[in-house]
């Protein structure tokens, strides 16, 4: 028999009767007083205000405050950081869901010994003898697996449920975290950097660049931000050659193209591992180089200059690196202070001067210094100081050491009506004074084959060289500070507009142009520097005619500048051997659209070697018959070059991989001016060039737009050639007999702003 709860049953009957009612219940009574407010409930997580994916590393930010991390002392380790990322509409939101980060902590302390730099970096993990990929992992579980597959203790991170995107870390193992220096000085500068792992884009693809916080330098005792005494090389200096990673603020500049470790982006991050604490590890004793950053970076960039003296991994890794600027110009890299000159110690010196043995005195005049403390006795100042011994700044100091100021160019007829004489005059100064009468310039020149560069100009500024003269053999007089040169030419050439400049290279020493001397091996002992020879324009037919300017000298028609080249090379003179050139208006004499020849086959470095152990270079079937400036610049920097005159600094291997180019190879603005269009309104090139001559014996021409593309490796194959032809180009192998070529239709798809514009497909992050 079913039983019922009597209380519930009674309540039901009462309710039923109450509802049935007994007539009117009267009017409502007055409202009672409000009750006390209830306690607030816990805040919920607003999922709509967080993100869990990000499309670009530059849109992801990790932030640590100096007061939110324990790095020295006896307090238990703890730290807090935030993660944010750009979401839809470009807004920034907390980033939720991080499961793994890595913490890099390094201290800068005064060196109290007489060996090494005045200040030293110390990795906290190395100091605590903790092996964990040079940094401490932090995970949800408190354990991690290193790149070598070793399971290690890690700090434990947790996301604050009340504040998504805010994470805290603690150490749940015995002792304190290895990122804490128990006996560390809280007044020493500490640098902290954080790396996040396993962050993906919305489609699940991993982010290609490392997700690194902006490193912070601070004093733990006060929590105040600080500035390192050791940062003599800025990220901006490295970016001059290694490209800038897009999307970061000017105050957080990062390198884009560093292959080692897939790029840690900033100098500050490199020293987190590459410091004396790491270098002291016996595992790195036999590499053939010092792995501490201040030494290693010298050896890397000295590369092929010291290849014969390199051993071990150093020879294999660095022996072919060609530093693009002058190795002795320390300030190319050291752009932040004079530490490099003021602090003289063995570790830095022998990383370049690898053949010097300071233990035996070999290659050091037999001198064996007792310690680094005595080095400044000889090298602290004067001619043996780093600044003077390396002749830092000498090239700039003598830029106006030899000046040619061209004043006239006149053609006169001879007895033979087919021959005319070209006479050119120039005011000349040497070391700031009017040059002495009868001065023999050959005594000052690194190569007497370099002289005046002279050629014809078409009405639209196109260059045709061929009127050059020697400052030695063609010199008529050197009187009253005026050099006069003259030579006979075909009379048909000595008409209309011409340009005049010079490429004389002379010897410099002690901030002066000096007579050249040679060592026992016949090598010139001084620095070869360029003359100053601003291009001048003359008209041999009508001196009063409107001046015609070369297209290389017209800012509206040239999309590169010497400053762009010099940002990496330092000086065009350095990269051009004995050519005394600093300006494109000098380069144009050899490198213009009317030369009609190349001189450089396309070769790659094979995997095979000859009987002497030297690499065998293989000539490809890709050919070029022009040496316009864009062509040789594209070809050299993209590895379409040859080894017929020595191994090039940039080359391709048998697999087509590029070696030696330090920048992002698809980023046109490494050389071309930012924001300038490469295409003119009619679809041709901005330069106005519409044809390129490809023969010295016949009038044969090809299209310039297609050739500009073809002169880079990626577009030099048969398929690319067919594509060019299909879009109206006249190409190598099938030239036309007229220079009046139709403009290719390349710009239809590839002009800036188009879906497949060069600014898109060749952007710094493209490919």
Image (cartoon, rainbow, N blue to C red):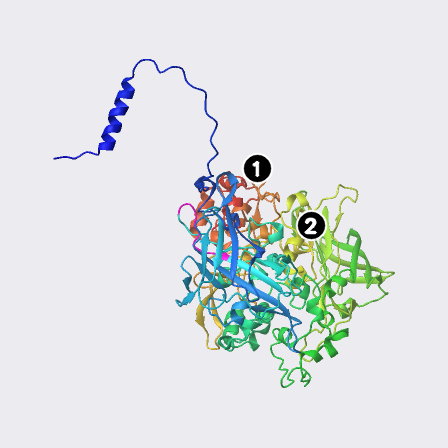
In this view of the protein, can residue 250 be seen by the observer?
yes
Camera-side mark, 2 or 1: 1
Q: Nearer the viewer, residue 250 or 221?
A: 221
**Label 1 sits on residue:** 682
| Magenta run includes residue 199 | yes
Residue 584 x, y percent position in the rendering:
67, 53
- Picture coordinates of residue 163, whole percent (x, y): 49, 46
- Along the polypeptide, which appears first: circle 2 or circle 1? 2
User: Residue 621, percent across and down?
Assistant: 45, 58
**Residue 696 visible within the image:** no
Among all residues in the image, which is located at the extreme left? 1
Q: Residue furthest top?
A: 23
Image quarter of the N terminus: top left
x 78%, y 58%: residue: 404
Query: Which of 181/615 is in front?
Result: 181
Q: Say which element carries label 1.
A: loop
Q: Give the distance between the C-alpha atoms of the residues marked 2 and 1, in whole angstroms.
A: 26 Å
Secondary structure, mark 2, is strand
The span shown in magenta is: 195-203
Q: Is residue 57 left or right of residue 221?
A: left
Residue 109 lies in the magenta-colored region: no
Name the residue beneath numbered marker 2: 456
Dividing the picture into quadrants, the one containing residue 690 is top right
Residue 402 or residue 663, whichever sits in front: 663
**Number of residue marks:** 2
Q: Nearer the viewer, residue 269 or 593?
A: 269
Q: Residue at x 41, y 17 (%)?
A: 28
């Amino acid at each position: 028999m079913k039983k019922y709860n009597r209380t519930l049953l009674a309540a039901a009957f009462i309710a039923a009767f109450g509802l049935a009612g007994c007539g009117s219940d009267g009017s409502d009574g007055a409202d009672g007083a409000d009750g006390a407010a209830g306690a607030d409930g816990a805040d919920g997580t607003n999922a709509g205000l967080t993100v869990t994916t990000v499309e670009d590393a530059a849109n992801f930010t990790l932030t640590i405050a100096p007061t939110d991390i324990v790095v020295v002392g006896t307090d238990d380790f703890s730290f807090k950081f935030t993660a944010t990322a750009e979401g839809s509409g470009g807004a920034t939101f907390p980033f939720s869901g991080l499961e793994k980060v890595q913490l890099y902590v390094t201290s800068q302390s005064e060196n109290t010994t007489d060996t090494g730099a005045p200040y030293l970096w110390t990795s906290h993990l190395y100091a605590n003898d903790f092996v964990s990929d040079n940094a401490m992992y932090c995970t949800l579980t408190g354990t991690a697996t290193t790149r070598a597959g070793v399971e290690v203790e890690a700090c434990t991170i947790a996301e604050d449920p009340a504040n998504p995107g805010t994470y805290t870390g603690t150490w749940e193992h015995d002792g304190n975290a290895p990122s804490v220096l128990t006996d560390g000085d809280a007044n020493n500068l500490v640098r902290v950097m954080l790396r996040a792992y396993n962050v993906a884009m919305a489609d699940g693809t991993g982010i290609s660049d490392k997700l690194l916080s902006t490193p912070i330098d601070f004093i733990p005792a006060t929590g105040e931000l600080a500035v390192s005494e050791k940062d003599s090389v800025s990220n901006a200096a490295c970016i001059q050659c290694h490209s800038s990673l897009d999307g970061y603020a000017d105050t957080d500049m990062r390198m884009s193209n560093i292959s080692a470790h897939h790029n840690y982006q900033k100098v500050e991050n490199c020293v987190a591992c590459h410091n004396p604490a790491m270098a002291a590890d016996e595992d790195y004793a036999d590499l053939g180089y010092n792995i501490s950053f201040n030494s290693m970076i010298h050896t890397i960039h000295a590369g092929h200059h010291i290849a014969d003296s390199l051993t071990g991994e150093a020879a294999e890794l660095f022996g072919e690196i060609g530093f693009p600027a002058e190795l002795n110009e320390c300030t190319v890299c050291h752009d932040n202070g004079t530490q490099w000159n003021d602090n003289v110690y063995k570790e830095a010196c022998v990383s370049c001067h690898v053949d010097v043995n300071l233990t035996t005195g070999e290659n050091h005049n037999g001198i064996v210094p007792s310690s680094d403390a005595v080095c400044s006795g000889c090298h602290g100042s004067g001619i043996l100081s780093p600044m003077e011994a390396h002749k830092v700044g000498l090239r700039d100091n003598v830029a106006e050491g030899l000046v040619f100021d061209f004043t006239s160019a006149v053609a006169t007829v001879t007895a033979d009506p087919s021959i005319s004489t070209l006479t050119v005059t120039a005011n000349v100064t040497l070391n700031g004074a009017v040059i002495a009468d009868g001065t023999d310039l050959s005594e000052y020149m690194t190569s007497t084959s370099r002289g005046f560069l002279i050629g014809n100009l078409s009405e639209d500024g196109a260059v045709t060289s061929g009127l050059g003269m020697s400052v030695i053999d063609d010199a008529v007089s050197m009187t009253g500070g005026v050099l006069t040169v003259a030579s006979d030419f075909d009379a048909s050439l000595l008409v209309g507009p011409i340009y005049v400049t010079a490429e004389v290279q002379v010897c410099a020493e002690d901030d002066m142009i000096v007579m050249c001397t040679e060592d026992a091996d016949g090598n010139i002992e001084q620095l070869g520097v360029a003359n100053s020879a601003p291009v001048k324009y003359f008209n041999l037919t009508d001196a009063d005619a409107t001046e015609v300017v070369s297209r290389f000298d017209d800012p509206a028609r040239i999309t590169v500048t010497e400053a762009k080249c010099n940002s990496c090379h330092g000086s065009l003179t350095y990269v051009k051997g004995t050519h005394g050139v600093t300006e494109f208006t000098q380069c144009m004499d050899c490198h213009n659209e009317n030369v009609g020849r190349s001189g450089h086959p396309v070769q790659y470095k094979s995997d095979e070697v000859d009987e002497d152990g030297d690499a065998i270079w293989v000539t490809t079937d890709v050919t070029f018959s022009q040496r316009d400036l864009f062509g040789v610049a594209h070809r050299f920097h993209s590895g379409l070059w040859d080894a017929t005159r020595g191994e090039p600094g940039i080359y391709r291997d048998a697999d087509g991989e590029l070696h030696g180019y330090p920048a992002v190879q698809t980023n046109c603005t490494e050389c071309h001016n930012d924001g300038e269009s490469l295409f003119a309104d009619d679809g041709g090139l901005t330069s106005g060039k519409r044809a390129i001559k490809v023969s010295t014996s016949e009038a044969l021409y090809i299209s310039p737009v297609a050739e500009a593309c073809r002169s880079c490796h990626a577009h030099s194959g048969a398929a690319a050639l067919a594509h060019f032809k299909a879009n109206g180009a006249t190409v190598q192998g099938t030239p036309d007999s007229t220079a009046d070529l139709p403009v290719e239709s390349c710009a239809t798809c590839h002009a800036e702003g188009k879906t497949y514009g060069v600014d898109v497909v060749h952007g710094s992050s493209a490919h």
